[in-house]
Every structure is written in structure tokens, then in C-alpha cells.
Amino acid sequence: MNNQTVSFLDNLPIILAGPILKHTDSKSVTVLVVLKQACQVVLKVYDTIDDGERLNNCLLIGQRYTVALGKHLHVVAVTAVSGNGENLTSHRIYAYDLEFTLPNKTTLSLEQALSSPRFPYVSISYFQHQKPTFILPPHRLEDLHIIHASCRKPQGHGFDALPILDSLIATTKQIRDRPQQLFLTGDQIYGDDVADAFLWYASPLGDTLLGWEEQLPIGQTDRTPQELPAGTRATIATVNAGFTAGLHNKSEKVSSHLFSLGEYYAAYILAWSPVCWPDTFPDAHTITQDPDVIKFWQESVKYLRQFMATLPQVRRVLANIPTYTIFDDHDVSDDWNLNQAWCLRVLGNPLGRRVVQNALLAYAVFQAWGNTPERFAKGENGENLLKAAAAWSHFQGKNENAEKAIARYVGIPSINPHTNLPNFVLEDGVFTLERDPQVLTWNYTVTSNCHQVIVLDTRTWRGYPADAKPIAPPMLLSPSAMQQQLQAPLQQTAHHQHLTSFVIAPTNVFGLQVIDWIHHWQLKREKVFSTDVGDAWNIHFPALARLLTTLCEQRQKLVILSGDIHYSCTAKLSYTKTRNPQQPSVLVQLTASALKNEEPITRIIHTKLKNWLLPEKKRYWIGWNQPPNLQEISARKLRHHQAKNHPDWYCLLEWIPKQNRRNFHQLTDISGLVPAHKPTINPKWRWLEPFMFWRSRWFQDGREVVGVNNIASVHFDLTEVENDYQVIHDVYWFDSICSNQVVYSRFTTNFRPNNKS
């Protein structure tokens, strides 16, 4: 698209991305749509008959005007509600339709708005009526089906696993088996670690959609995104903006860092829709003569093309299942708010502040608006943020009042005029970033007839130790955040015994023990940015103790959904109060990562080599409530420490082994992509192939984790024990031997405590 004008928009449909089905319950349905021109959008929700085959009565209706985020970028999250008090129910397939009225009073149907000369036929439905459909969560836990995943980098190695969900929905034969909710638990886009080829396209696309070029504050001058081409941003990102992803000889991680608002907007559109992608990328040799850059360019283009090829399936998925999201660090930049040192480095720089503000504004529009539409309703702070965003674009980034309003609503702290550093507030012995009373909150809760999902914001409300160095690991939730985000919603439903509670923690509560060792070792060496020291709950013992007591004092059974770490696994924690051992609590942690970002190290731990060298053993802790703290001990010393140290509680963590892989035969054929993905063997070494045991399925199938691109399903079965459920965690991934075959690894556990050594 370089050197092209906005005429490229003529070949695009009105809808650039979406429809994306967002917050959905029995009383309301919200759909997000991204369009290239302003219009009024009407949403209608229908009952269906014959298991979804035919539309019936219109039950819900709503309308809303788009918000002009750019000259050619108009976004709306429209919510439909009942006019007569009628509610949607479980075990029924509902359909929805959209209607678009343009400024010239022309009205377009959904089918018309999706199609164009470049895209003459677009299917976003699983039925002949061509309307997207969905179902609500059930009344019984054993009928609940949740999908979760995280970490989707366009140029990440391997196939994108999100399209697997398209096949899961398409091949579901029973209504009760169709997935009801999708939770994307972080890193929906990558602001850092951006491929040069991606930025080469996303940057001018963003400017074109905005209709203007942002003036980025760099040193004493302002520069536009086009003056900062792909592959040249490392020094500016690290020195001028203060970002840490490029430290420790990793400049390639930030050489194409997103900076401008248009670039962050474009990243979301390109992540969720095939509409705006280019037909071709330039040959690497026309960009550079550096052989290393050429190599990385060609490799990233290969994986970008694989990503693009399955975007139609991704688009259909997002239109047909309620999708809830929360950010992690890469939605802004690696290490975002990792510790106080990061905040001082980045938020104390004009460019760093601007980039974080741009990322959070894009998150608010493309993720938070649909997650919590009530916060963007008329008169709410979310609506005020949208007005400020529209004003900022209308005045082409030169309206100071709009910029200040955006900063206030998305939570950018004010600057101390004496130090030019961000302001912090002291709270219960920790510093928190200053929060304006009008700031939007990003955490939220989703509740149905059988479950409650508490989605945590572990990035913007951290507690940084006041008596330690700025690089010290933080509390991922400050004391006030713990109360408001976790304790309050748990208490509100404490008497609803029929609800099973889920907590979405974008960063893992418990990870591999070797990672713990590395984090503590790197912390001693003060190299915290190279391995994300501080992003794990169990690196800050008082915070972990407070989390466990908050959860286990409120619930005896609880599921934690997490991602972030680029492998999937299942673990169970049994928590016993010393004074009341007859009422233990059980936390089951289900991790799903990455959708598209497998790495050499994760592919290694995917194999049996991990089990042989570093098997996960049972781990024991004793803990205290006042002040919160815990201590890891051996099983042999458990009784001794209980008698000597008088803990308030003790717990046992065990990793659940996965069962042998199972075939999933219903996947849409993707064999055409295999030659670009499957490694080839030099013919002269082919005779060695029978001896390459590491390529065999036997070796590839490890015991504890799935370390290749994957997506996971969570469901439950009743057991023979009264009121006990078996938790089933099915992790779907591409077979490393036959990469057009999808298999799944099943992890099963239950809510029965295991306090035996």
C-alpha cells in the first residue's frame, strides 16, 4: 500500500472488521463493528427454530451511531435489548442481523456491507440463512463449554490455532456441546516484537484510515510515523520512549515497535479481519541489502501469509461466539508496568507516555467497549472517552484538551513538575500509579446461571514496594485492587452456591519450577527485564499469600484461567486451613498459550525431554494471614514446620499429566499451507530419518505441557461423588509430524483435595 492513495478503500467493503460478538447475556447482546464510513447501525436478535436453521421472532433490538475515530475509520459497539422484558434462555440458538444506514439515507444489509469487488462473497455464518448465531451458557455446570487462549502474534511461528475453534463450532452436532463463550486472556496484538513487514503495511494503513499523520514527540522535535520506517526504531524505542523489550542485545524486538495511534488501530483490524491486508509484500531485496534483515523479512512474510490465509475462519469465529478479552503486556509493549523502574523509564518520557496512551485508547475502543458496554453508555466515562478520541482525530492530533481527556480516562498518571516523572500514591506500604477519579476500570465480571467469571486487570493497578529498589517485583494487584477486583465480586455471590467461580489471571499464578528458579536468579543479578521477573505471582510471596487467602477463604472450589507463558498445562492446588482442616479449598489452574507464538524453548518442553530432565514435582507451602506471607518447604519437613512456625494454612500444588493425544478429524483442510510450515530434510541426510527419534510422535508427546500453538476447551463432568465435578481441559494443537492434522491433549482433574505427599 506504500505510495498509494485512499483510492484503495474503493475496493473494500463498508465493514473493515467484524461483526464481533461481545458481551452477551439473557437481557442484552453487544456487537462490535469497524467501518470505513459513518452510519447508524441497527442490531436485531432473533429466535430460531429447527436447531438454528430458520429465523423466527425478533426478540431484542438496539441502535447506535458510529464514532469517527478517523476520516475512514468509524467504530461502534451496538447493544440490543428487549422492548417487552423478554429474556433469552439457555439451550437455544439465537441469530442476529445488522442494518446500516449511511449519511445519504442509503440502507445496507449485513450481506451488502460485508461484500465488495475484492470480496464478492463473505460467509460469517454456519447456516444457510447466513446470519451469525450464538447460544447462552447453560443452567448446569456439566453443560458449560468455555474456550480460552492467549498470545497471538501475526508473524509467530507455526499455524494460528484460533481457526481450530471455527471447526469446533462447525462440527458441533448437539446444541449443548456448542461452545458458549471465548475468553482471550492477553496479548491480542503485539505492540513490540513487530515484524518489519507488518509495520511496513500497518503504519501507512493507520495513517490512511485516520486521514492524518500523528506528530510523535521525539526529543526536541516531532516526527511522523512515516519518518520512522520499519526496522529503524530500536534506538528511539529504547532511548527516547524508554521501552525495555530491546534491552540486553534484543534490539530486533523493538526495531518496528508500534508508536502511533493509527498503527495500534491498524494492528487490531489486521488481527481480526482479512479485509485490509495487502495482496503482496515487497521482495526483501528491494527493502535492504543486509543479509540478516533479508532473512528475517522473508521468514516473517511466510508466517504472516499463513496468518492471513485463515483470517476468514477467525472472522467467522468472532462473529458467532461471545468473546471477552483482557490485556497483558504486549497489547501495549513488553514489560508494560512490570515494576516501578519501567514506569519511571517510560511514563517519564513524552514519547513513552504517548505510545502507552495510544495503546490504551486502542484497547478501550477495540476490546473494553465490547467487554463492558455499560461503561460506554450515554453519560458514562467511556462515552466521554469516545468523544475525546473523536475530537483528537477531528483536530488531527492537535487538540490539547482532547489529549488530556484521553490521558485522564485511560489512566495515564500526571507528571510531577519538579521531577518530570509520573506521580505515585502510597497505599498500605506500596506505591501505585496515580489514578484519576474518572479513570476507566478494565476489570469486569461475567455471570450466568451456572458460573461467574472474574476478569482481573493485573497491569494498571499494581503495588510497587515502597521499601525496595524500583526493580523489585510488584504486587500484581495492590491491596485496594485486590479488594475491588477480587474480594468484592466474590462476596457478592458468596450465597449463590450453584455458581462456579472462575478467575481470569492474565499472568500465571503458578508456573514451571525452573522458571521460578530463573526469576529468583535474575532478580539477584538485577536483570529483571530479560525474563519478565515480576510478572509471576509466585515471585512476590506476600502478594501470592494474599491472593490465595482471598480466594480460598471465599470459595472451596475455583478455576483459574490463564495464559501468557506460551505453553498450556493444568495444575491443582489444595489449600487447608490449620484451624479447620475439614473444609479445604481446591484451585484448579488451566493455562492456554500461545495461539500463535511457539518458540524453540516451548517446543522443547513440549517433548519428553522436559519430563526426563526437569519433571514437575509436588510443591508444598505454609502460609500466614497477618501479615500475608508464605514459605515453600519440602514434604518431609511439612509436619515439623507446622508444629514450629504455627502457620494459618498449608497447601500442595500438583501438576496434572496429560493423556495421550487424540485425533480431531473435523478440521477444515489446510494441507495447502503445509509446505511452507513443515521442515524439510536435506536429501543426502534422508537415510538418517529412521534414527531421528526426536521427530517421532513418541518423543514429541511430553507429559506435562503443550508447547506448540494451541487453543483450549474447558468443560465438566459429574463424578460418582456427590456434587463433585471432573474438570476437563482439552488443548488442541497441530500435529508436529503431520501439520494439517489437529490433535488434542486432555488434562483431567477434580475438586477433591489432595494433601498427601
Image (cartoon, helix red, strand yellow):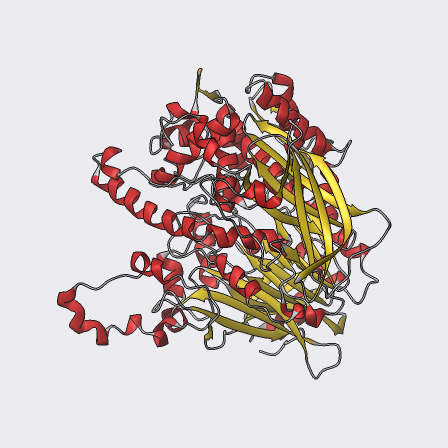
* Res. 696 image quadrant: bottom left
In percent of width and height, residue 227 lies at 38, 23
Who is closer to the viewer here, 651 or 608? 608
Above-or-below relation of 477 to 587: above
Q: Quadrant of the C terminus?
A: bottom right
Residue 242 position by quadrant: top left
The structure residue drawn at horizontal position 38% and vertical position 47%, both measured from the top left corner, is: 304
Residue 111, given in percent of the width and then of the height, sits at 58, 46
Q: Position of residue 272 (x, y in %)?
A: 51, 46
Q: Can residue 475 be seen in the rendering of this structure?
A: no
Numbered-mark total: 0
Q: Residue at x 61, y 35 (%)?
A: 75
Residue 596 coordinates in the image, percent (x, y): 44, 54
* As drawn, 621 above or below 465: below
In this rendering, position of residue 425 left or right of residue 680: right
Q: Residue at x 75, y 36 (%)?
A: 377
The quarter of the rendered structure image containing the N terminus is top left
Name, please, the residue furthest toward the bottom.
Answer: 720
Instruction: Report whether 477 appears left or right of 281.
Output: right
Horizontal side of 9 relative to 560 (left or right) equals left
Name the residue at the right extreme: 84
Seen in the picture, residue 32 relative to 262 is either above or below; the reply is below
From this viewpoint, is residue 131 visible?
yes
Of 231 and 533, the residue lying toward us: 231
